[in-house]
Amino acid sequence: MKPYQVLLAFFLLATANSFSQTIYVADNNPNAPTGDHVFSTLQECIDIASDGDIIHVIPANDNYGSVIIDKELHIIGSGWIPDNQTGMKSRIYSIQFESNNANGSTLNGLVLTQTNDYPIYYGELNAPLDTLKDIEIYNCKIPGIAQRDNCPIKNIILRNNIFLGLYTTVGYPAIDFKTSAGMTEDLLISNNIICVNYAGGNVRAALSAANQTLITNNLFYSNSGYYAFHDIINCFITNNVFFGASAKSYSYGATVGKNYANVYSNNLSYECTSYGGCDIPPVSTSTPANTGSGNLPNTDPLYATLTDGWFWSADNSLDLLDFSPLTNGGTDGTDIGVTGGAYPFNNYENLRGVPYVHQMSVPGLIMENQDIQLEAEARSNQ
């Protein structure tokens, strides 16, 4: 058995014993194994799968392209910066969720690569108005996510992701949820690293949201106090760190974002005085006004290694130094920032979709019918 085939076998075994659904495999590597459930494209797997099935996207050099999810599926990749022996990732150009049909789907351990438009859309163009609900995305690296006008969303969870690298028109936030009444319900944005991106002179806010969205234990990361929010209305904003990013809404020329009726609790800001400022809560743009308590404006979080900047680096360390104000400083008694809350983001340096082979060695020369002495080191997805 070749080392690559062993890697694939372990990738499948990682969840085979945990689920009763059918597992399909998307594998576009040269000389990929064959079988009834193995396909070279991800869309083929999606088309043949049934509601509730699992799809493993095998790490590869080639991108798996654009896909449409039209049923409940659970798509799992290898993660971002995977320290497996191949160093490859499960890369997908873009994903579109069809309203209603894709309810209950999850994405885990994928790297989305489209940057000149949103690589993930909730809803499809020119479709009747319909609600998409119960979608969870975690352990992914994503330039951005957007919601279409014809797709109300409900019970959406974004957790333990890194949002980085969206390159679009000035003013488009990396996470763009609609703010009108009835368009969003029960949204949770938790324990993510969300970058206020800068590309080609364009600066974008990180997030638009409304309707009592819970925004908790995230790191909003930027440079010189650029704006974390575009339109943010009637949200609960708790236990976040604004590092180099301002909690104020986006302002560029005649475009002024909305920021009012929010509750800011136990957030910390730092390195944000140049543009939007470090005030928490920020000045309200309308009534009712923003309120808040327990916030720590312009306070050093005492991370091990972090400086403000435009581009997130894997060299950053969010380990907390002694006497950090983040330690146990959240509303729930856990840390402020990504290491606290319900989904502590401890593997931010190495997002992993499933347990995987970290290192494997086999003899250099194997004779026919000879037993193979295989040594493998595996790591969990935490």
Image: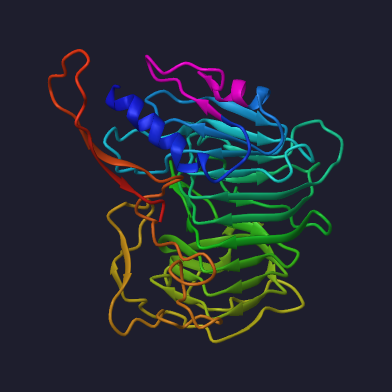
Asked if one can make out residue 254 in the rendered structure from this viewpoint, the answer is no
Quadrant hosting residue 270: bottom left
Q: Residue placed at 47% from the left, 16% from the top?
A: 34
- Report the side of 160 relative to 292 (left or right): left
What residue range appears in magenta?
24-45
The C terminus - image quarter: bottom left
Q: Nearer the viewer, residue 286 or 166?
A: 166
Does residue 346 show up magenta in the picture?
no
Quadrant hosting residue 6: top left
Identify whether 82 is placed above or below 46: below
Q: Residue placed at 37% from the left, 25% from the top?
A: 61
Q: Residue placed at 23% from the left, 36% from the top?
A: 360
Q: Nearer the viewer, residue 269 or 219?
A: 219
x and y, in percent, of residue 95 in the image: 61, 34
The N terminus - image quarter: top left
Q: Residue placed at 47% from the left, 75% from the top?
A: 336
x and y, in percent, of residue 166 in the image: 50, 43
- Report the side of 62 relative to 205 (left or right): left
x and y, in percent, of residue 228 in the image: 53, 62
Name the colouring of the figure.
rainbow
Asked if one can make out residue 51 in the rendered structure from this viewpoint, the answer is yes
- Report the side of 338 relative to 70 (left or right): left
The mark total stands at 0
- Report the side of 31 relative to 15 (left or right): left
Does residue 37 show up magenta in the picture?
yes
Quadrant hosting residue 303: bottom left
Identify whether 44 is placed above or below 51: above
Q: Nearer the viewer, residue 197 or 100?
A: 100
Single out the residue that lies furthest toward the right: 128
